[in-house]
Image (cartoon, grey):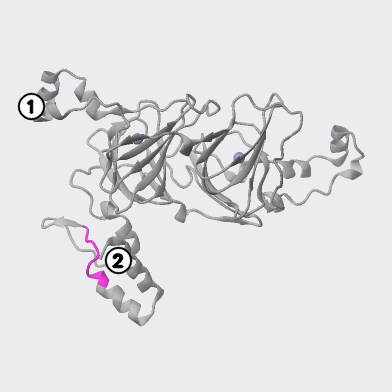
Amino acid sequence: MDSISRRDALLAGAVGSIAAVSAFQAQAQTLPSPSRGPGHGGTDVGPRDPARDLENPDMLNPPATDSGTLPNLKFSFSDAHVRQESGGWTRQITERELGISKSIAGVNMRLNAGGVRELHWHKEAEWSYMLYGSARITAVDANGNSFVEDVGVGDLWYFPSGIPHSIQGLGPDGCEFLLVFDSGSFDEDSTFLLGDWFKHVPPEVLGKNFGLPASVFGHTPDPKELYIFPLPIPTGTDEIKGASPVPDSFKYRLLAQTPQVMPGGSVRIVDSGTFKASKTIAAALVELEPGAMRELHWHPNTDEWQYYLEGEGRMGVFASSGQARTFDYRAGDVGYVPFAMGHYIENTGTTPLRFLEMFKSSYFADVSLNQWLALTPRELVTGHLRLDADFMAALKRAKSPVVL
Ligand code: MN
Ligand code: MN
């Protein structure tokens, strides 16, 4: 039985019918043990969480090369609080959930058809990847240029810090997307909301500001009603007549980019070189075939924040000082690699593994272990590693990212 159907059987056991319970007991015999063999670990007689143990084989039974303490580098959106609103829902993974993630925070949001994420702004820049459906996004920059565009699956947007914007789910079924902010301390509950401000300015001041009697104001809905709320699905193009467009579009079609294709999969890279507006977030969309691996590498500029789109995989992280740990990931998980730590990502499942790598940087950069050694004098390399000529001959000069 493969690990997915075993997990399903165990989950069925947790529901509690007698048949399912005996299936549970039968399957419990095949649960992995925290043991690499005699003299390494032992059995786990419980209490235990079988579904989690099956999802995290490298936590329960780590490779012998793992060593020392590393901060937690994984958090699942399934463990994040969901804020349910009249037009959809939202949940976030920030440094409050994943303590190590100081440079980036993420939000997963669903807008039903017509559902609007209220007109708002925030201190952090916002980068987004559309996961499902389509949305209409709007913004105005500090020079009075306007932006209104529709985005679909695989499209990105980027709103610079402090720039006001909105998002609305379109037909037939709204949208779901990932938001990435260039600070780990971002909080979805602390954005500057249009309705909230109107509620906290005296009506006579609003009157003076808009050239109308004070009596016009004071009827704005409670800010809690507007955060994500339903409106009719927009019709037409919503073009703002006579307005000048933003000089660099806030939209980029990542899936329209031709990927770098390699034997093990493919990579698409997007940073301010290709998506000019995206000044503080660089990203890569990586696809790995079953068994394939994103080769050993590190990033010379900043931390890496990951979002797993589909499949199952594991990442091994080398932290210097003899420390290394391995984490398992699946769709909906967030992973993190602190600045400069070496790592690899391997597809351990039976279907493609797709994930996003994101960096708080204007540019994407990484260093390949293989390329480094290939471009270093031979005597120096063999003197360190004591590997023979076959190893030296196998080294490749290919620039990362390489998927094998
Ligand atoms: Mn926003
Ligand atoms: Mn990386």
| Rendered image quadrant of residue 266 | top left
Real-space Cα distance between discs 2 and 1? 45 Å
Question: Mark 1 highlights which residue?
Answer: 389
Mark 2 or mark 1, earlier in chain: 2
Secondary structure mainly formed by the magenta segment? loop
Relative side of 159 to 334, left or right: right
Q: Which mark is residue 6?
A: 2
Q: Is residue 11 visible?
A: yes
Q: Residue at x 24, y 29 (%)?
A: 369
**Quadrant assignment for ligand 1:** top right
**Quarter that holds the C terminus:** top left
**Quarter that holds the N terminus:** bottom left
Q: Residue at x 85, y 36 (%)?
A: 205
Pick whichever, 85 or 1, lies toward us: 1
Asked if the beta carbon under badge 1 is closer than 8 A to the nearest atom of ligand 2, the reply is no
* Residue range (magenta): 27-34
| Rendered image quadrant of residue 270 | top left
* Residue type for callout 2: Arg
Q: Position of residue 249 (x, y in %)?
A: 59, 29
* Residue type for callout 1: Ala
Residue 270 lies in magenta, yes or no?
Answer: no
Secondary structure type for disc 2:
helix
Q: Position of residue 169 (x, y in %)?
A: 62, 49
Q: Which mark is residue 301?
A: none
